[in-house]
Image: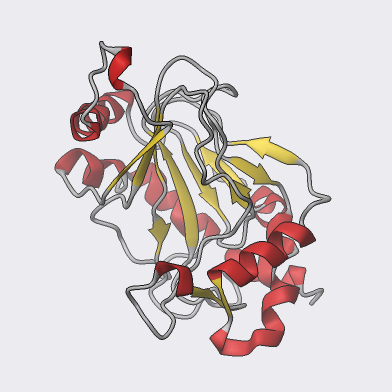
């Protein structure tokens, strides 16, 4: 069963074995091909991170639609409150490297477009988490502490609602909320999204997180799609309960 209390308190839960290791291997094979790198030739691993696009092939659709995962969505978002996914979003593949990745700042993910929908940096976040029910981390490879696991500040999702509430429905732009959320959550303990291929982390939309350099030996394959809400989150949703707790209600 999914630990809803831990999700509300810490901002994340890990669903172990959310999809099979066989599915993870099928997905990895597709991702390896698209990196343009050779799994058997480390001289081709020239960049610290290779960003791949959205993936809707059958293995990816199967991975995001297992009964175990759907039950976890129901538990932490609410039954009937989320939209099923047919793809798995962008996939940053991180390679062992001495170079800095250049994308490892603390932030929360933006949820809805601003005036220019083509400008990602102008995307926004508001206190109702418009446009996003969860941030999800899909592990397609085994990830240890040296393998560039996503860093998360446990409990940091409770620091964000007081920053967003004064901005109303319009919310704040990505860069604005990223800086404010990073400062407000500096006191939180850092944990790492480690696990085995087939594990999925379900994260509160306001969880402050960051990438990091890869100091291990094998590339890390992970997708980071949002789970979209089907409408405004009800008061009974654990996502909404955590937001209200952050506002001391």
Q: The C terminus is located in which quarter?
A: bottom right
Residue 178, position in %: x, y? 62, 63
- Determine the image quadrant of residue 131: bottom left
Residue 192, position in %: x, y? 62, 35
Q: Which residue is rendered at x = 46% and y = 22% of the image?
A: 96
Q: Is residue 126 left or right of residue 45?
A: right
Q: Is residue 69 above or below residue 43?
A: below
Q: Is residue 123 left or right of residue 243?
A: left
Query: Camera-side residue: 175 or 168?
Result: 175
Q: Which residue is rendered at x = 33% and y = 22% of the image?
A: 45
Residue 31, position in %: x, y? 24, 33
Q: Is residue 14 above or below residue 204?
A: above
Q: Is residue 17 left or right of residue 103?
A: left
Query: Camera-side residue: 191 or 21?
Result: 191
- Determine the image quadrant of residue 68: top left
Q: Is residue 42 above or below residue 156?
A: above
Q: Is residue 112 above or below residue 213?
A: below
Residue 65, position in %: x, y? 29, 48
């Amino acid at each position: 069963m999914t630990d809803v209390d831990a999700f509300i308190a810490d901002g994340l839960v890990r669903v172990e074995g959310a999809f099979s290791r066989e599915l993870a291997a099928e997905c990895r094979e597709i991702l390896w091909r698209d990196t343009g790198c050779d799994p058997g030739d480390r001289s081709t691993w020239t960049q610290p991170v290779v960003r791949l696009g959205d993936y809707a092939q059958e293995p990816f659709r199967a991975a995001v639609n297992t009964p175990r995962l759907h039950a976890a969505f129901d538990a932490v978002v609410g039954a009937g409150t989320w939209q099923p996914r047919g793809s798995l979003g962008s996939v940053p593949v991180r390679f062992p490297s001495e170079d800095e990745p250049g994308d490892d700042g603390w932030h929360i993910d933006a949820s809805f477009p601003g005036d220019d929908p083509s400008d990602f940096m102008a995307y926004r976040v508001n206190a109702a988490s418009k446009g996003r029910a969860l941030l999800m981390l899909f592990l397609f490879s085994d990830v240890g502490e040296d393998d560039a696991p996503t860093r998360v500040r446990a409990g940091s999702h409770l620091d964000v609602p007081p920053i967003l509430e004064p901005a109303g429905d319009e919310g704040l732009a990505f860069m604005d909320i990223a800086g404010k959320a990073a400062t407000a959550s500096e006191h939180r303990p850092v944990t790492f999204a480690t696990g085995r291929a087939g594990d999925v982390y379900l994260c509160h939309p306001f969880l402050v997180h960051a990438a990091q350099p890869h100091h291990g030996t094998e590339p890390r394959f992970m997708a980071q799609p949002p789970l979209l809400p089907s409408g405004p989150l009800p008061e009974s949703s654990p996502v909404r309960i955590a937001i209200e707790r952050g506002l001391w209600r």
